[in-house]
Amino acid sequence: EQQLVVSSRSAIDDSLLHDVKHRILRTACKASLVPNPASKFTLAAAAFIYCHEAPFKVPVLMRLEANAPAKAFRITVRSPSQDAAAATRNILQALITSYFIM
């Protein structure tokens, strides 16, 4: 498991969460969204990371928890492979921080 808190430069609202869900998780990460009726501020997704060495296909679970008052996201990534989890966490961090610069 890999965790990290990333600051947002924009206020976290419904529009921003929609963009994170569709532009970052679905489009950039090619992940399938997991329904989460408990909180609109928690986004969960699952994907496979493809590697050049065995195992060639590694499952990865991603969870983004938005903290609107703190303008931050907690990124949690789980995978049987520590390398895949760390790489996915780094990718999410880069996508979120670069997305919110605009």
Image: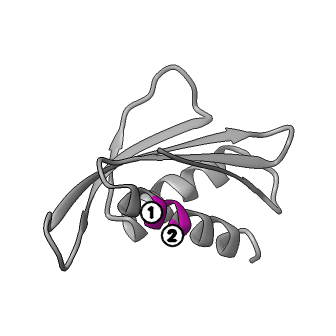
Between 79 and 31, which is closer to the camera in this rendering? 79
Residue 75 placement (x, y as % from top left):
59, 48
Q: Which amino acid does label 2 sit on?
A: Ile
Tell me what residue is drawn at x 49 percent, y 52 percent.
21
Dot 2 and dot 1 residues touching (CB under 8 Å): yes
Residue 22 placement (x, y as % from top left):
45, 58
Q: Which amino acid does label 1 sit on?
A: Thr
Residue highlighted by disc 2:
91
Tell me what residue is drawn at x 82 percent, y 48 percent.
71
Tell me what residue is drawn at x 76 percent, y 75 percent.
101
Magenta-highlighted stretch: main secondary structure?
helix
Between 65 and 87, which is closer to the camera in this rendering? 87
Q: Distance between the residues labelled 2 and 1?
A: 5 Å
Between 53 and 13, which is closer to the camera in this rendering? 53
| 24 relative to 63, above or below | below
Residue highlighted by disc 1:
88
Magenta stretch bounds: 86-91
